Image (cartoon, rainbow, N blue to C red):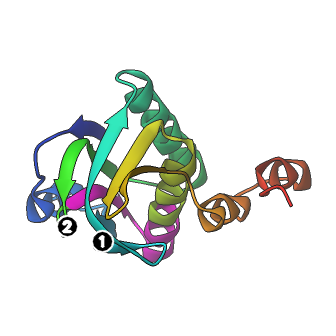
Amino acid sequence: MTVRVQREVFDVTQLIASLQAKDPGVGAVVNFVGYVRDINQGEAVAGLFLEHYPGMTERSLQKIIDNARTRWPLRAVEVVHRIGPLSISEPIVFVGVSSPHRQAAFEACAFIMDYLKTDAPFWKREDVAGGARWVDARDSDRSAVVRWADTPQEAAMQRVPA
């Protein structure tokens, strides 16, 4: 189980290969790669700058992975998130999991990404025509984590306020 926060571009092919790594117990590998888009909220984006809270960010990501491991039988997990200045079409984040079964791999990958978007201490600044703006988690990101709640009380705590 690996967590990395880095400035450097990552090698997706290498990360995917590491998830299987000749482990005969792996039946499925699922991954997500997020890229810098050229448009957000209907406005052209020239680039991004990502900041994080060193130490706390890695611990937060590890906690998300640990929670996923209690829910699904995971063989390996790789989470790599970039920081610093990023250009359009550059990769931002990689989340990959391997598991004996495909459904567990799909669900665990989605779970990790959903919580990463809402709970990991990253701050994203977009460069747009009118200057720079800080971007908060979207309501859709906050709503996505509700599906993972184990109890109605937990779901209520995660809902987006009306």
Q: Which amino acid type is shown beneath numbered disc 1?
A: Arg
Q: Residue 88 carries which label?
A: 2
> Is residue 100 on the magenta stretch?
yes
Which residue is under mark 1?
A: 37
Is residue 1 in sight in this rendering? no
In x, y percent, where is residue 141? 59, 62
Please provide the residue range marked out in magenta.
Answer: 91-108
Q: How many labels does the image show?
A: 2
In x, y percent, where is residue 111? 54, 59
Q: Is residue 101 above or below residue 67?
A: below
> Is residue 75 on the magenta stretch?
no
Q: Quadrant of the C terminus?
A: bottom right
> Label 2: few (<14), some or many (≥20) within 10 Å?
some
Q: Mark 1 and 2 residues: CB-CB less than 8 Å, in contact?
A: yes
Q: Is residue 125 above or below residue 41?
A: above
Tell which of 37 and 95 is nearer to you: 37
Q: In this view, does 87 lie above or below 65?
A: below
Give the SS element for disc 2.
Answer: loop
| Residue at (48, 54) in percent of width and height | 112
Name the image quarter holding residue 23: bottom left
Considering every residue shown, the one lying at the far front of the view is: 130
Give the SS element for disc 1.
Answer: loop
